[in-house]
Amino acid sequence: MPDPLPFDPIGEARRHWTDRWGPEPARPMTAVTNIMRVQQILLARLNELLRGHGLTFPRYEALMLLCFTRSGAMPLGKIGDRLQVHRTSVTNIIDKLEQDGLVRRVPHDRDRRATLAEITDAGRTLAEAATLELNAAAFALEGLAPADEEQLSALLESVRRTAGDFED
Amino acid sequence: MPDPLPFDPIGEARRHWTDRWGPEPARPMTAVTNIMRVQQILLARLNELLRGHGLTFPRYEALMLLCFTRSGAMPLGKIGDRLQVHRTSVTNIIDKLEQDGLVRRVPHDRDRRATLAEITDAGRTLAEAATLELNAAAFALEGLAPADEEQLSALLESVRRTAGDFED
DNA sequence: CCAGAATAGGAGGAAGTCCGACTATTTGCA
DNA sequence: TGCAAATAGTCGGACTTCCTCCTATTCTGG
């Protein structure tokens, strides 16, 4: 972690924006920049927490997704839909998980185009251990009261719904 | 943009989490996952908006940072501190901006180790045009009222301050 | 003053992501 | 029924980021 800056660079950007283009565009610019920076901080911390388990956050997400399915298996394409990552990224992620013996590829019963990723016992064990550690670390999220966390999720969910991320 | 899912995958993950580990760890997990997903959505949209100008979001950020300095120039290392990206990423970003004639490298007056990145007239012109487009698109942020945007920024700023991102 | 530590920038490599092209298979419509 | 279109997964390439050195320069303490 680098030394903290002696001032808030996003706050300074907001002042410049307001001076030049007014408060109206400065508001969403500030919110978006804050999201970018917080995501960067959280991702770095999560990967740090997961490193000891030999996982990255995308791989952890894939593992947990398989954990929560009935059969412990899911077609690769569906994994991509759920995690919102590109098909080729899913291939890459599953490759690594398979190399580590956490997942195995299984042919689909009815559709011979499709391949299922099925979590192994080792995968379940590792997912459980990693989750306990992330839960204990509050998923690297600090500085918010429980009600703040709820409010943050509610605001972000509104953005996702508007963006067409899901329906309902 | 892929078709929206018929349900909220983060909400479903939260239910699974609550069933298995209780509501306490499920809350930050939900907030963190929402941040990850919203960042992904916003970054994709911003890059889409900037593509017509030949920019990516990190390059745009660097260009705007230089715009707002007195002299229009800044050492590469300081750019990395401000944008919170690795030194080698700054080298890469400035390389591309320099290739496009938006920035030029200038030796530092007093410290011969240091190199300044100085914005060119073309860089200022492009930065202005790109900013007008991003401002008009509200920085790709939709689904929030002005007060919501302020609240979102306040919550995220709290996370950043707690993480030691800045002091004050 | 000068040797060692610290700092600035860069080169090369590893990892992750997206895109386009490709093969194999399935679906749908005429 | 049969053939074009859509779908599932993979491969190679381009891009971005970070990490580990490496060189040149500046700072610092004896």
Image (spheres, coloured by chain):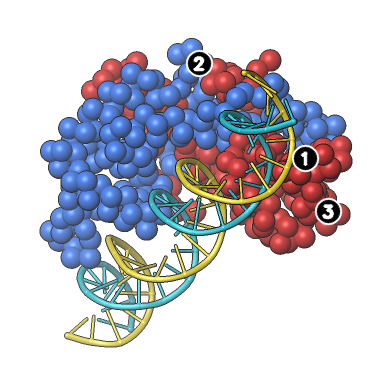
Chain colours: A red, B blue, C yellow, D cyan
Residue B110 to residue B6: above or below = below
Q: Quadrant of residue B72?
A: top left
Q: Nearer the viewer, residue A20 or B129?
A: B129
Residue at left 77%, top 40%?
A111
- From the image, tell me which residue sits under label 3: A120
- From the image, tell me which residue sits under label 2: B144
Please state which amino acid type lies under the numbered disc 2: Leu
Where residue B100 sits in the image (x, y, percent)?
Answer: 22, 46
Where residue B1 sits in the image (x, y, percent)?
Answer: 52, 28
Residue at left 48%, top 18%?
B142
Q: Which label number is shown at residue B82? A: none
Q: Are marks 2 and 1 on the same chain?
A: no
Residue at left 84%, top 42%?
A109
Where residue C7 sits in the image (x, y, percent)?
Answer: 32, 63
- From the image, tell me which residue sits under label 1: A111
Q: Nearer the viewer, residue A107 or B21?
A: A107
Q: Chain of mark 2?
A: B
SS at circle 1: loop
